[in-house]
Every structure is written in C-alpha cells, then in structure tokens.
Image: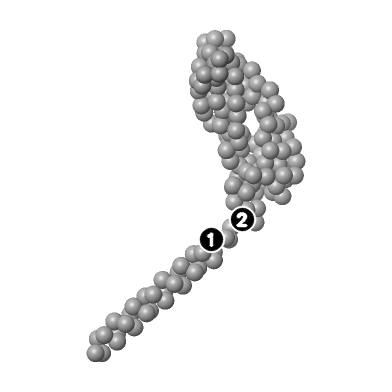
Amino acid sequence: MAATGKLANARLTCTGVFAVCLFAMFFLAGCGEGAGSDAQLTSQTYFELVDWHISGFWVINCPVAWVRIKNFNNVAIKDITFQYNTYDYDGTPLDQGTYTIEGSVPALSVKNFPELYVGLVNLHSDKLSTRLLSVKADSGGGGGGGH
C-alpha cells in the first residue's frame, strides 16, 4: 500500500511539473521583440515593383528591378525578401526565384531600391511578377542601401 502511495505521489509531482512547463511555454510564447513577429511586420509592409527591364544581351538574362518599399511598422525593417516569376510573351511560366534586398527601411517611411539584379532567367522572359515574402525587424534603425 505504501508503494502505491509513493507511485501516486510521483505521478502527481510529474504531472505538476509538466503542467508548469506547459503553462510557461504558452505564457512565454508571446514574449519576444516589441515589434511583433515577422508575419506581423510583413503584413504592415507595402511592396511595389515600379519598373523592370532585362539586362544581358541575350547571353545571360537578368531582370533588373526597381522596387519601392513602404514601411508602416513602428520599427525599421531589413532582409526584405520577395519572390519573382518570369513568363514568356504568351504568359507561359518560365522561372521562379527569390531575392533578399540588402539594406533596410526606417520605421514609417518609404524607400526606393533601383537597379536590383535579381537573378538569371530564361532567354525568352518577357513578363515579370513579384510578391513580398517576408521582412525582419532591424535593430540598427534602418537606413542602409536604396535611395
């Protein structure tokens, strides 16, 4: 009977420790940077492809993009990553890639990034689409790169 009581006590202690750890995990999961998660920062960032052209003289084709970023966050952002897709004249998909902008955008401001050489693409690329994937908080305050 005494062994059964010790076993029940051990189970109760183990369950209590597990409950405390579980509670701490959920309670502390909300802690982090005051700026919020990367998804929150990304949702408050406006990405615009202003213009683009192909560079390479039909030997090595590379889209050169002019991108404008509007940062509606209360913190500077960096590591601005976007996806690009190329298409031929008829709209047939050709290439897909990602590009991360070097530099940052200060809080509550707009910044242009002209002349971004985003990657090598098919020689028949005539159309380009872009989509913002993610941004990260910049503890340095922003300001690098772009115009």
Contact, CB < 8 Å: mark 1 with mark 2? no
The residue singled out by tag 1 in the image is 29
* Separation (CA) of disc 1 from disc 2: 11 Å
Q: Which residue is outermost to the right?
A: 109
Q: Quadrant of residue 64?
A: top right
Q: Position of residue 132 (x, y in %)?
A: 60, 36
- Percent across and percent down for residue 112 are 71, 31
Quarter of image, res 82: top right
Amino acid type, label 1: Ala
Residue at 59% of width from left, 47% of height from top?
Answer: 39
Q: Which residue is mark 2?
A: 33
Q: Residue at x 55, y 18 (%)?
A: 91
Bin the neighbour count of mark 1 within 10 Å (Cα to Cα): few under 14, some 14-19, many 20 and up: few
What residue sits 45% from the left and 69% below the top?
Answer: 21
Q: Is any part of residue 70 visible from this angle?
A: yes
Placement of the N terminus among the 4 image quadrants? bottom left
Disc 1 versus disc 2: nearer the observer: 1
